[in-house]
Protein backbone atom coordinates (compact mmCIF):
# COMPACT_ATOMS: atom_id res chain seq x y z
CA UNK A 1 0.00 0.00 0.00
CA UNK A 2 1.69 3.25 -1.06
CA UNK A 3 1.91 5.94 1.60
CA UNK A 4 -0.26 8.42 -0.36
CA UNK A 5 -3.04 5.85 -0.06
CA UNK A 6 -3.15 6.50 3.69
CA UNK A 7 -6.57 7.51 4.95
CA UNK A 8 -7.11 9.34 8.20
CA UNK A 9 -8.18 6.76 10.76
CA UNK A 10 -11.67 7.06 12.12
CA UNK A 11 -12.22 5.64 15.57
CA UNK A 12 -12.95 2.27 14.02
CA UNK A 13 -10.89 2.07 10.87
CA UNK A 14 -7.14 1.73 10.47
CA UNK A 15 -4.68 1.15 7.67
CA UNK A 16 -3.27 -1.80 9.62
CA UNK A 17 -4.58 -3.85 12.53
CA UNK A 18 -2.14 -6.23 14.21
CA UNK A 19 -3.67 -8.99 16.34
CA UNK A 20 -1.10 -10.04 18.95
CA UNK A 21 1.39 -7.80 20.74
CA UNK A 22 4.29 -10.21 21.27
CA UNK A 23 7.76 -9.90 19.69
CA UNK A 24 6.27 -10.53 16.25
CA UNK A 25 3.22 -8.27 16.51
CA UNK A 26 4.51 -5.21 18.34
CA UNK A 27 7.48 -4.61 15.97
CA UNK A 28 5.09 -5.01 13.02
CA UNK A 29 2.86 -2.31 14.53
CA UNK A 30 5.75 0.05 15.24
CA UNK A 31 7.29 -0.35 11.77
CA UNK A 32 3.88 0.14 10.10
CA UNK A 33 3.48 3.38 12.08
CA UNK A 34 7.01 4.43 11.09
CA UNK A 35 5.81 3.88 7.52
CA UNK A 36 3.16 6.54 8.19
CA UNK A 37 0.22 4.15 8.34
CA UNK A 38 -2.51 4.34 10.97
CA UNK A 39 -2.13 1.29 13.18
CA UNK A 40 -3.86 -0.50 16.05
CA UNK A 41 -2.34 -3.40 17.95
CA UNK A 42 -4.74 -5.70 19.81
CA UNK A 43 -3.41 -7.93 22.57
CA UNK A 44 -5.22 -10.07 25.13
CA UNK A 45 -2.30 -11.18 27.38
CA UNK A 46 -3.11 -11.31 31.09
CA UNK A 47 -0.60 -12.13 33.79
CA UNK A 48 -1.30 -14.50 36.68
CA UNK A 49 -2.27 -11.50 38.84
CA UNK A 50 -4.86 -10.48 36.22
CA UNK A 51 -2.93 -7.48 34.89
CA UNK A 52 -2.93 -6.93 31.13
CA UNK A 53 0.43 -6.44 29.41
CA UNK A 54 1.86 -6.20 25.91
CA UNK A 55 4.93 -8.26 25.02
CA UNK A 56 3.37 -11.72 24.66
CA UNK A 57 5.06 -14.90 25.78
CA UNK A 58 8.55 -13.57 25.24
CA UNK A 59 8.44 -10.60 27.59
CA UNK A 60 5.95 -11.92 30.14
CA UNK A 61 6.62 -15.64 30.39
CA UNK A 62 9.52 -16.58 28.14
CA UNK A 63 12.75 -14.99 26.94
CA UNK A 64 13.00 -12.16 29.45
CA UNK A 65 11.98 -13.73 32.78
CA UNK A 66 13.97 -16.88 31.96
CA UNK A 67 17.08 -14.86 31.20
CA UNK A 68 16.65 -12.86 34.41
CA UNK A 69 16.52 -16.05 36.49
CA UNK A 70 19.35 -17.66 34.51
CA UNK A 71 21.56 -14.66 35.29
CA UNK A 72 20.69 -14.59 39.00
CA UNK A 73 21.02 -18.34 39.47
CA UNK A 74 24.34 -18.39 37.62
CA UNK A 75 25.69 -15.70 39.95
CA UNK A 76 24.50 -17.69 42.97
CA UNK A 77 26.27 -20.75 41.59
CA UNK A 78 29.48 -18.90 40.76
CA UNK A 79 29.74 -17.24 44.15
CA UNK A 80 29.82 -20.69 45.70
CA UNK A 81 31.79 -22.64 43.10
CA UNK A 82 34.12 -20.17 41.43
CA UNK A 83 34.87 -17.15 43.59
CA UNK A 84 37.43 -19.01 45.75
CA UNK A 85 39.47 -19.71 42.59
CA UNK A 86 39.65 -15.95 42.00
CA UNK A 87 40.87 -15.54 45.57
CA UNK A 88 37.60 -14.13 46.81
CA UNK A 89 36.39 -15.69 50.01
CA UNK A 90 32.67 -15.48 50.59
CA UNK A 91 31.03 -17.27 53.45
CA UNK A 92 27.44 -17.74 54.41
CA UNK A 93 25.95 -17.22 50.94
CA UNK A 94 22.22 -17.67 51.18
CA UNK A 95 19.42 -17.54 48.67
CA UNK A 96 16.66 -14.93 48.85
CA UNK A 97 14.37 -16.40 46.21
CA UNK A 98 11.64 -13.84 46.87
CA UNK A 99 14.09 -11.03 46.01
CA UNK A 100 15.31 -12.93 42.94
CA UNK A 101 11.73 -13.29 41.72
CA UNK A 102 10.98 -9.65 42.57
CA UNK A 103 13.94 -8.50 40.44
CA UNK A 104 12.72 -10.69 37.57
CA UNK A 105 9.17 -9.32 37.81
CA UNK A 106 10.50 -5.76 37.89
CA UNK A 107 12.45 -6.31 34.68
CA UNK A 108 9.40 -7.82 33.00
CA UNK A 109 7.18 -4.93 34.13
CA UNK A 110 9.63 -2.30 32.89
CA UNK A 111 10.04 -4.00 29.53
CA UNK A 112 6.31 -4.57 28.92
CA UNK A 113 5.40 -1.03 29.96
CA UNK A 114 8.16 0.10 27.60
CA UNK A 115 6.12 -1.25 24.69
CA UNK A 116 3.26 1.10 25.58
CA UNK A 117 5.76 3.98 25.60
CA UNK A 118 7.08 2.89 22.20
CA UNK A 119 3.51 2.69 20.86
CA UNK A 120 2.76 6.17 22.15
CA UNK A 121 5.89 7.62 20.56
CA UNK A 122 5.21 5.90 17.23
CA UNK A 123 1.48 6.65 17.23
CA UNK A 124 0.21 3.07 17.48
CA UNK A 125 -3.23 2.66 19.11
CA UNK A 126 -3.01 -0.03 21.80
CA UNK A 127 -6.16 -2.08 22.30
CA UNK A 128 -6.12 -4.55 25.18
CA UNK A 129 -8.56 -7.41 24.70
CA UNK A 130 -9.44 -10.10 22.18
CA UNK A 131 -9.28 -9.70 18.40
CA UNK A 132 -11.09 -11.90 15.92
CA UNK A 133 -10.70 -11.71 12.15
CA UNK A 134 -14.00 -11.64 10.29
CA UNK A 135 -14.52 -11.72 6.52
CA UNK A 136 -13.53 -8.64 4.49
CA UNK A 137 -10.71 -7.50 6.83
CA UNK A 138 -13.15 -6.62 9.59
CA UNK A 139 -11.98 -7.28 13.12
CA UNK A 140 -14.18 -7.82 16.13
CA UNK A 141 -12.48 -6.38 19.21
CA UNK A 142 -13.67 -7.39 22.68
CA UNK A 143 -12.02 -5.28 25.40
CA UNK A 144 -11.11 -6.90 28.72
CA UNK A 145 -14.20 -5.25 30.24
CA UNK A 146 -16.40 -7.08 27.70
CA UNK A 147 -17.22 -4.08 25.47
CA UNK A 148 -17.24 -4.94 21.76
CA UNK A 149 -16.25 -2.84 18.75
CA UNK A 150 -16.26 -3.64 15.07
CA UNK A 151 -13.05 -2.41 13.46
CA UNK A 152 -11.95 -2.46 9.86
CA UNK A 153 -8.54 -2.31 8.23
CA UNK A 154 -6.97 -2.31 4.82
CA UNK A 155 -4.43 -4.82 6.07
CA UNK A 156 -4.55 -7.25 9.00
CA UNK A 157 -1.49 -8.92 10.52
CA UNK A 158 -2.11 -12.04 12.63
CA UNK A 159 0.54 -12.58 15.34
CA UNK A 160 -1.26 -14.76 17.86
CA UNK A 161 1.80 -16.74 18.96
CA UNK A 162 1.96 -20.14 20.58
CA UNK A 163 1.05 -22.04 23.73
CA UNK A 164 2.80 -24.84 25.64
CA UNK A 165 2.01 -28.37 24.54
CA UNK A 166 0.26 -30.34 27.27
CA UNK A 167 1.09 -34.01 27.73
CA UNK A 168 -1.93 -36.23 28.16
CA UNK A 169 0.22 -38.33 30.50
CA UNK A 170 1.12 -35.29 32.66
CA UNK A 171 -1.71 -32.74 32.43
CA UNK A 172 -1.51 -29.27 34.00
CA UNK A 173 -4.25 -30.15 36.47
CA UNK A 174 -2.38 -30.07 39.75
CA UNK A 175 -0.12 -27.32 41.12
CA UNK A 176 2.86 -29.72 41.12
CA UNK A 177 2.81 -30.19 37.33
CA UNK A 178 3.52 -26.95 35.54
CA UNK A 179 4.44 -25.49 32.17
CA UNK A 180 7.47 -23.25 31.53
CA UNK A 181 5.64 -20.17 32.82
CA UNK A 182 4.82 -21.96 36.08
CA UNK A 183 8.46 -23.02 36.40
CA UNK A 184 9.53 -19.36 36.24
CA UNK A 185 7.28 -18.50 39.17
CA UNK A 186 8.17 -21.11 41.83
CA UNK A 187 8.15 -19.49 45.26
CA UNK A 188 10.43 -22.11 46.78
CA UNK A 189 13.18 -24.33 45.40
CA UNK A 190 11.77 -27.82 44.80
CA UNK A 191 13.95 -30.47 46.44
CA UNK A 192 13.39 -32.95 43.58
CA UNK A 193 12.41 -31.67 40.16
CA UNK A 194 11.63 -33.58 36.96
CA UNK A 195 11.80 -31.73 33.66
CA UNK A 196 10.08 -33.51 30.78
CA UNK A 197 11.83 -32.61 27.53
CA UNK A 198 15.53 -31.72 27.28
CA UNK A 199 15.02 -29.13 24.53
CA UNK A 200 15.95 -25.46 24.65
CA UNK A 201 13.36 -24.43 27.26
CA UNK A 202 13.76 -27.56 29.40
CA UNK A 203 17.54 -27.14 29.58
CA UNK A 204 17.30 -23.48 30.59
CA UNK A 205 14.71 -24.14 33.31
CA UNK A 206 16.52 -27.26 34.53
CA UNK A 207 19.72 -25.18 34.82
CA UNK A 208 18.01 -22.44 36.84
CA UNK A 209 16.64 -24.79 39.49
CA UNK A 210 19.73 -27.03 39.58
CA UNK A 211 21.89 -23.98 40.33
CA UNK A 212 19.50 -22.96 43.08
CA UNK A 213 19.75 -26.38 44.71
CA UNK A 214 17.16 -28.75 43.19
CA UNK A 215 18.01 -32.33 42.30
CA UNK A 216 17.02 -32.19 38.64
CA UNK A 217 16.18 -35.21 36.48
CA UNK A 218 15.58 -34.43 32.81
CA UNK A 219 13.61 -36.98 30.83
CA UNK A 220 14.04 -36.80 27.07
CA UNK A 221 12.20 -39.16 24.72
CA UNK A 222 14.76 -38.96 21.91
CA UNK A 223 17.89 -41.10 22.16
CA UNK A 224 20.09 -38.21 20.93
CA UNK A 225 20.85 -35.14 23.04
CA UNK A 226 19.88 -31.87 21.32
CA UNK A 227 19.13 -33.62 18.05
CA UNK A 228 18.58 -30.27 16.29
CA UNK A 229 22.13 -29.05 17.06
CA UNK A 230 25.53 -29.93 15.61
CA UNK A 231 26.36 -33.18 17.39
CA UNK A 232 29.95 -32.23 18.30
CA UNK A 233 28.45 -29.19 20.02
CA UNK A 234 25.71 -31.26 21.68
CA UNK A 235 28.22 -33.81 23.03
CA UNK A 236 30.41 -31.08 24.53
CA UNK A 237 27.40 -29.38 26.13
CA UNK A 238 26.06 -32.66 27.55
CA UNK A 239 29.42 -33.36 29.20
CA UNK A 240 29.32 -30.01 31.00
CA UNK A 241 25.65 -30.30 32.00
CA UNK A 242 26.32 -33.72 33.53
CA UNK A 243 29.26 -32.28 35.49
CA UNK A 244 26.88 -29.65 36.85
CA UNK A 245 24.70 -32.42 38.23
CA UNK A 246 21.89 -32.32 35.70
CA UNK A 247 20.71 -35.93 35.53
CA UNK A 248 19.79 -36.11 31.83
CA UNK A 249 18.15 -39.40 30.84
CA UNK A 250 17.88 -39.92 27.08
CA UNK A 251 15.50 -42.32 25.35
CA UNK A 252 13.14 -41.80 28.30
CA UNK A 253 9.54 -41.30 27.23
CA UNK A 254 7.22 -40.12 29.99
CA UNK A 255 3.98 -42.07 30.12
CA UNK A 256 2.46 -40.85 33.38
CA UNK A 257 2.71 -38.39 36.27
CA UNK A 258 0.50 -38.88 39.32
CA UNK A 259 0.53 -36.42 42.21
CA UNK A 260 0.20 -37.98 45.66
CA UNK A 261 1.04 -37.23 49.28
CA UNK A 262 4.75 -38.16 48.94
CA UNK A 263 5.23 -36.21 45.71
CA UNK A 264 4.54 -36.77 42.03
CA UNK A 265 5.16 -40.28 40.75
CA UNK A 266 6.55 -40.03 37.24
CA UNK A 267 6.52 -43.10 35.01
CA UNK A 268 8.67 -43.34 31.91
CA UNK A 269 9.81 -45.97 29.46
CA UNK A 270 13.39 -46.44 28.36
CA UNK A 271 15.40 -49.22 26.71
CA UNK A 272 15.33 -51.20 29.97
CA UNK A 273 11.55 -51.04 30.39
CA UNK A 274 9.16 -49.12 32.64
CA UNK A 275 10.85 -46.87 35.20
CA UNK A 276 9.52 -44.77 38.07
CA UNK A 277 10.68 -41.68 39.82
CA UNK A 278 9.25 -39.61 42.67
CA UNK A 279 9.71 -35.83 42.60
CA UNK A 280 8.21 -32.77 44.23
CA UNK A 281 7.50 -30.87 41.04
CA UNK A 282 7.30 -31.58 37.32
CA UNK A 283 7.98 -29.11 34.53
CA UNK A 284 6.55 -30.11 31.17
CA UNK A 285 8.71 -28.60 28.42
CA UNK A 286 7.89 -30.76 25.41
CA UNK A 287 7.46 -27.95 22.91
CA UNK A 288 4.88 -25.37 21.88
CA UNK A 289 1.97 -25.35 19.46
CA UNK A 290 0.56 -22.50 17.37
CA UNK A 291 -2.20 -20.61 19.21
CA UNK A 292 -5.19 -19.55 17.10
CA UNK A 293 -8.07 -20.07 19.52
CA UNK A 294 -11.11 -17.98 18.50
CA UNK A 295 -8.87 -15.92 16.21
CA UNK A 296 -10.59 -16.66 12.90
CA UNK A 297 -14.28 -16.46 12.02
CA UNK A 298 -15.43 -19.45 9.95
CA UNK A 299 -15.69 -17.24 6.85
CA UNK A 300 -12.38 -15.36 7.32
CA UNK A 301 -10.85 -17.45 4.54
CA UNK A 302 -7.55 -17.94 6.39
CA UNK A 303 -6.38 -21.55 6.40
CA UNK A 304 -4.46 -23.62 8.92
CA UNK A 305 -2.12 -26.48 8.01
CA UNK A 306 -2.40 -29.99 9.45
CA UNK A 307 -0.34 -28.99 12.53
CA UNK A 308 -2.45 -25.92 13.25
CA UNK A 309 -0.07 -23.25 11.89
CA UNK A 310 -1.60 -20.44 9.83
CA UNK A 311 -0.68 -21.16 6.20
CA UNK A 312 1.57 -18.50 4.69
CA UNK A 313 4.02 -18.10 1.82
CA UNK A 314 7.67 -16.93 2.11
CA UNK A 315 6.57 -13.36 2.67
CA UNK A 316 3.91 -14.24 5.27
CA UNK A 317 0.88 -13.70 3.00
CA UNK A 318 -2.01 -15.94 4.08
CA UNK A 319 -3.70 -16.22 0.70
CA UNK A 320 -6.51 -13.86 1.75
CA UNK A 321 -5.88 -10.46 0.17
CA UNK A 322 -4.52 -8.04 2.79
CA UNK A 323 -4.19 -10.64 5.58
CA UNK A 324 -0.73 -11.64 6.78
CA UNK A 325 0.53 -13.90 9.60
CA UNK A 326 3.86 -13.84 11.44
CA UNK A 327 5.76 -15.28 14.42
CA UNK A 328 5.10 -18.51 16.30
CA UNK A 329 1.66 -19.01 14.69
CA UNK A 330 3.32 -19.69 11.31
CA UNK A 331 5.92 -22.19 10.08
CA UNK A 332 9.60 -21.84 10.96
CA UNK A 333 11.50 -21.79 14.25
CA UNK A 334 9.57 -20.50 17.26
CA UNK A 335 11.97 -17.70 18.10
CA UNK A 336 11.32 -14.09 19.07
CA UNK A 337 13.83 -12.65 16.59
CA UNK A 338 12.38 -14.68 13.72
CA UNK A 339 8.94 -13.24 14.50
CA UNK A 340 10.33 -9.72 14.83
CA UNK A 341 12.00 -9.92 11.43
CA UNK A 342 8.79 -11.21 9.84
CA UNK A 343 6.85 -8.36 11.48
CA UNK A 344 9.20 -5.75 10.09
CA UNK A 345 9.17 -7.40 6.66
CA UNK A 346 5.38 -7.46 6.49
CA UNK A 347 5.04 -3.84 7.65
CA UNK A 348 7.50 -2.75 4.96
CA UNK A 349 5.84 -4.82 2.24
CA UNK A 350 2.46 -3.32 3.20
CA UNK A 351 3.97 0.14 2.73
CA UNK A 352 5.26 -0.81 -0.71
CA UNK A 353 8.85 -0.99 0.51
CA UNK A 354 11.38 -3.81 0.18
CA UNK A 355 11.06 -6.57 2.76
CA UNK A 356 12.61 -10.00 3.19
CA UNK A 357 13.31 -12.55 5.92
CA UNK A 358 16.40 -14.67 5.38
CA UNK A 359 15.25 -17.98 6.85
CA UNK A 360 18.65 -19.57 6.17
CA UNK A 361 20.42 -17.29 8.62
CA UNK A 362 18.42 -17.38 11.86
CA UNK A 363 20.57 -17.81 14.97
CA UNK A 364 19.59 -20.17 17.80
CA UNK A 365 20.79 -19.62 21.36
CA UNK A 366 20.46 -21.73 24.51
CA UNK A 367 21.30 -19.63 27.56
CA UNK A 368 22.82 -22.37 29.68
CA UNK A 369 26.37 -22.36 31.06
CA UNK A 370 28.24 -22.90 28.88
CA UNK A 371 26.00 -21.06 26.46
CA UNK A 372 25.15 -22.72 23.13
CA UNK A 373 24.61 -20.84 19.87
CA UNK A 374 24.59 -21.65 16.22
CA UNK A 375 23.62 -20.39 12.80
CA UNK A 376 23.34 -22.13 9.47
CA UNK A 377 23.92 -25.81 8.78
CA UNK A 378 25.29 -28.39 11.20
CA UNK A 379 28.21 -30.54 10.12
CA UNK A 380 25.77 -33.47 9.85
CA UNK A 381 23.52 -31.49 7.49
CA UNK A 382 26.42 -30.44 5.28
CA UNK A 383 27.72 -34.02 5.18
CA UNK A 384 24.25 -35.30 4.21
CA UNK A 385 24.06 -32.71 1.41
CA UNK A 386 27.09 -34.34 -0.21
CA UNK A 387 28.97 -31.06 -0.57
CA UNK A 388 32.70 -31.24 0.19
CA UNK A 389 33.41 -29.23 3.34
CA UNK A 390 36.07 -28.30 5.84
CA UNK A 391 35.82 -27.70 9.58
CA UNK A 392 37.77 -25.42 11.90
CA UNK A 393 37.50 -25.75 15.68
CA UNK A 394 39.05 -23.51 18.31
CA UNK A 395 38.82 -24.44 22.00
CA UNK A 396 38.18 -21.70 24.57
CA UNK A 397 40.93 -23.33 26.65
CA UNK A 398 43.33 -21.55 24.26
CA UNK A 399 41.58 -18.19 24.68
CA UNK A 400 43.30 -15.78 27.06
CA UNK A 401 40.06 -13.89 27.70
CA UNK A 402 38.08 -17.06 28.45
CA UNK A 403 40.81 -18.18 30.85
CA UNK A 404 40.82 -14.78 32.53
CA UNK A 405 37.07 -15.10 32.93
CA UNK A 406 37.51 -18.61 34.40
CA UNK A 407 35.11 -19.77 31.68
CA UNK A 408 37.28 -21.72 29.28
CA UNK A 409 34.82 -24.54 28.55
CA UNK A 410 33.72 -25.29 25.00
CA UNK A 411 34.77 -24.26 21.51
CA UNK A 412 33.89 -22.32 18.38
CA UNK A 413 33.42 -24.32 15.18
CA UNK A 414 33.18 -23.12 11.60
CA UNK A 415 31.87 -25.37 8.81
CA UNK A 416 32.65 -24.10 5.30
CA UNK A 417 32.44 -25.27 1.70
CA UNK A 418 35.63 -26.71 0.20
CA UNK A 419 34.85 -25.40 -3.30
CA UNK A 420 34.22 -21.67 -2.76
CA UNK A 421 35.13 -21.31 0.95
CA UNK A 422 31.64 -20.00 1.86
CA UNK A 423 30.76 -20.29 5.55
CA UNK A 424 27.86 -22.76 5.85
CA UNK A 425 27.45 -22.92 9.61
CA UNK A 426 28.97 -21.66 12.84
CA UNK A 427 28.49 -23.49 16.14
CA UNK A 428 29.65 -22.19 19.50
CA UNK A 429 29.48 -23.71 22.95
CA UNK A 430 31.17 -21.51 25.51
CA UNK A 431 31.10 -18.17 27.32
CA UNK A 432 28.67 -15.63 25.81
CA UNK A 433 28.15 -17.82 22.75
CA UNK A 434 24.85 -16.02 22.16
CA UNK A 435 26.69 -12.72 21.74
CA UNK A 436 29.54 -14.20 19.70
CA UNK A 437 27.18 -15.75 17.17
CA UNK A 438 26.13 -12.28 15.95
CA UNK A 439 29.41 -11.95 14.04
CA UNK A 440 28.78 -15.26 12.30
CA UNK A 441 25.20 -14.22 11.45
CA UNK A 442 26.44 -11.00 9.87
CA UNK A 443 29.19 -12.87 8.02
CA UNK A 444 26.70 -15.39 6.63
CA UNK A 445 24.19 -12.66 5.77
CA UNK A 446 26.91 -11.25 3.51
CA UNK A 447 27.81 -14.75 2.21
CA UNK A 448 31.27 -14.37 3.71
CA UNK A 449 34.05 -16.91 3.22
CA UNK A 450 36.33 -18.19 5.96
CA UNK A 451 39.00 -16.01 4.32
CA UNK A 452 36.85 -12.93 4.97
CA UNK A 453 36.76 -13.82 8.67
CA UNK A 454 40.43 -14.80 8.66
CA UNK A 455 41.43 -11.38 7.30
CA UNK A 456 39.23 -9.45 9.74
CA UNK A 457 41.08 -8.04 12.74
CA UNK A 458 39.64 -9.15 16.07
CA UNK A 459 40.60 -7.30 19.23
CA UNK A 460 42.84 -9.09 21.69
CA UNK A 461 42.12 -10.53 24.15
CA UNK A 462 38.45 -11.12 23.35
CA UNK A 463 36.19 -14.13 23.17
CA UNK A 464 35.51 -13.17 19.54
CA UNK A 465 39.04 -14.25 18.69
CA UNK A 466 37.76 -17.83 19.04
CA UNK A 467 35.55 -17.32 15.96
CA UNK A 468 38.50 -15.76 14.10
CA UNK A 469 40.78 -18.66 15.02
CA UNK A 470 38.12 -21.26 14.15
CA UNK A 471 37.90 -19.69 10.67
CA UNK A 472 41.71 -19.92 10.41
CA UNK A 473 41.63 -23.51 11.68
CA UNK A 474 39.33 -24.46 8.79
CA UNK A 475 42.45 -24.01 6.59
CA UNK A 476 44.82 -25.36 9.24
CA UNK A 477 46.20 -21.86 9.74
CA UNK A 478 45.18 -21.23 13.36
CA UNK A 479 47.87 -19.43 15.28
CA UNK A 480 46.84 -19.98 18.88
CA UNK A 481 45.99 -23.67 18.77
CA UNK A 482 47.55 -26.74 17.20
CA UNK A 483 46.13 -27.41 13.72
CA UNK A 484 44.97 -31.00 13.34
P1 LIG B 1 3.71 -14.51 21.50
O1 LIG B 1 4.89 -13.99 22.18
O2 LIG B 1 3.10 -15.78 22.02
O3 LIG B 1 2.63 -13.34 21.50
C1 LIG B 1 1.36 -13.50 21.01
C2 LIG B 1 0.46 -12.52 21.70
O4 LIG B 1 -0.79 -12.50 21.03
C3 LIG B 1 0.16 -12.88 23.15
O5 LIG B 1 0.26 -11.75 23.95
C4 LIG B 1 -1.27 -13.40 23.09
O6 LIG B 1 -1.97 -13.18 24.31
C5 LIG B 1 -1.83 -12.53 21.98
N1 LIG B 1 -3.01 -13.09 21.31
C6 LIG B 1 -3.19 -14.33 20.82
N2 LIG B 1 -4.40 -14.44 20.22
C7 LIG B 1 -5.00 -13.23 20.35
C8 LIG B 1 -6.25 -12.70 19.95
N3 LIG B 1 -7.12 -13.44 19.27
N4 LIG B 1 -6.54 -11.43 20.28
C9 LIG B 1 -5.65 -10.66 20.96
N5 LIG B 1 -4.45 -11.10 21.35
C10 LIG B 1 -4.12 -12.37 21.05
N6 LIG B 1 12.69 -17.08 21.97
C11 LIG B 1 13.86 -16.51 21.71
O7 LIG B 1 14.07 -16.05 20.58
N7 LIG B 1 14.83 -16.38 22.67
C12 LIG B 1 14.66 -16.87 23.91
O8 LIG B 1 15.55 -16.76 24.76
C13 LIG B 1 13.44 -17.51 24.22
N8 LIG B 1 13.22 -18.00 25.46
C14 LIG B 1 12.01 -18.56 25.74
C15 LIG B 1 11.80 -19.06 27.02
C16 LIG B 1 10.59 -19.63 27.36
C17 LIG B 1 10.37 -20.15 28.76
C18 LIG B 1 9.54 -19.66 26.38
C19 LIG B 1 8.20 -20.24 26.73
C20 LIG B 1 9.75 -19.18 25.10
C21 LIG B 1 10.99 -18.64 24.76
N9 LIG B 1 11.25 -18.15 23.48
C22 LIG B 1 12.46 -17.59 23.20
C23 LIG B 1 10.24 -18.22 22.41
C24 LIG B 1 9.56 -16.88 22.26
O9 LIG B 1 8.95 -16.53 23.47
C25 LIG B 1 8.54 -16.93 21.14
O10 LIG B 1 9.17 -17.38 19.94
C26 LIG B 1 7.93 -15.57 20.89
O11 LIG B 1 7.29 -15.10 22.05
C27 LIG B 1 6.92 -15.62 19.73
O12 LIG B 1 6.43 -14.36 19.51
P2 LIG B 1 4.97 -14.12 18.91
O13 LIG B 1 4.78 -12.64 18.90
O14 LIG B 1 4.82 -14.87 17.66
O15 LIG B 1 3.97 -14.79 19.96
P1 LIG C 1 11.70 -28.29 22.24
O1 LIG C 1 10.89 -28.64 21.02
O2 LIG C 1 13.09 -27.75 21.95
O3 LIG C 1 10.94 -27.43 23.21
O4 LIG C 1 11.94 -29.67 22.99
C1 LIG C 1 10.92 -30.51 23.47
C2 LIG C 1 11.53 -31.88 23.75
O5 LIG C 1 10.59 -32.67 24.49
C3 LIG C 1 11.86 -32.66 22.48
O6 LIG C 1 13.23 -32.98 22.49
C4 LIG C 1 10.99 -33.92 22.58
O7 LIG C 1 11.66 -35.07 22.11
C5 LIG C 1 10.73 -34.04 24.09
N1 LIG C 1 9.53 -34.81 24.43
C6 LIG C 1 8.31 -34.77 23.83
N2 LIG C 1 7.43 -35.62 24.43
C7 LIG C 1 8.10 -36.24 25.45
C8 LIG C 1 7.75 -37.24 26.44
N3 LIG C 1 6.53 -37.78 26.54
N4 LIG C 1 8.72 -37.63 27.33
C9 LIG C 1 9.96 -37.10 27.26
N5 LIG C 1 10.34 -36.16 26.34
C10 LIG C 1 9.43 -35.73 25.44
Image (cartoon, rainbow, N blue to C red):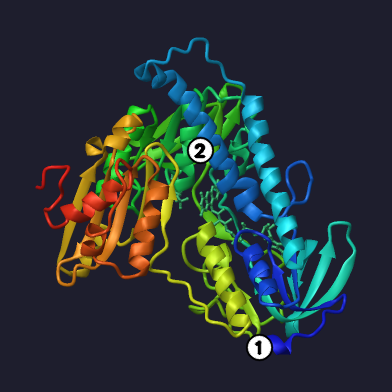
Name the spot of residue 154 as percent of width and height, x first: 73, 83
Name the spot of residue 14 as percent of width and height, x first: 78, 78
- Label 2, secondary structure: give it: helix
Residue found 30% across the figure and 56% down from its top? 426
Crowding near the residue tagged with mark 2, few <14, some 14–19, many ≥20 C-alpha atoms within 10 Å? many
Indicate the quadrant where residue 142 lies: bottom right
Name the spot of residue 351 as percent of width and height, x first: 63, 82
Relative vertical location of residue 182 with respect to residue 26 in this rendering, above or below? above
Residue nearest the viewer, comparing 112 with 135:
112
Q: Which residue is mark 1?
A: 2
Q: Is residue 255 left or right of residue 304?
A: left
Indicate the quadrant where residue 462 lies: top left
Name the spot of residue 459 as percent of width and height, x first: 31, 47
Answer yes or no: disc 2 within 8 Å of ligand 1: yes
Residue found 65% across the figure and 41% down from its top? 107
Relative vertical location of residue 277 with respect to residue 125 in this rendering, above or below? above
Q: CA distance from mark 1 to mark 2?
A: 46 Å
Q: Which residue is mark 2?
A: 205
User: Image quadrant for the N terminus?
Assistant: bottom right
Q: Nearer the viewer, mark 1 or mark 2?
A: 1
Numbered circles on residues, count: 2
Amino acid sequence: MPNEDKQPATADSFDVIVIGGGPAGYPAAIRAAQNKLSVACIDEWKNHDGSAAFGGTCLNAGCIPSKALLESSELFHRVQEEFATHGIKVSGTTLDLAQMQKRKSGIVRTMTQGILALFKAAGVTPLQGHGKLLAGRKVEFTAHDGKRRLLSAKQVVLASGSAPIELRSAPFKSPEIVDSWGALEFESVPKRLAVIGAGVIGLELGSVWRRLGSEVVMLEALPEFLAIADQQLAKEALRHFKKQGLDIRLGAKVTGATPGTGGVQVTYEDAKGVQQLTVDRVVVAVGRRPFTQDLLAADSGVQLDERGFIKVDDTCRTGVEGVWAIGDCVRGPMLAHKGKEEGVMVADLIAGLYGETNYKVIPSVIYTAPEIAWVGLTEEQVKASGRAYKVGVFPFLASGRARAMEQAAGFAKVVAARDDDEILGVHIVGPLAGELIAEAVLAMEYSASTEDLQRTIHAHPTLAEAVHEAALAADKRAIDSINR
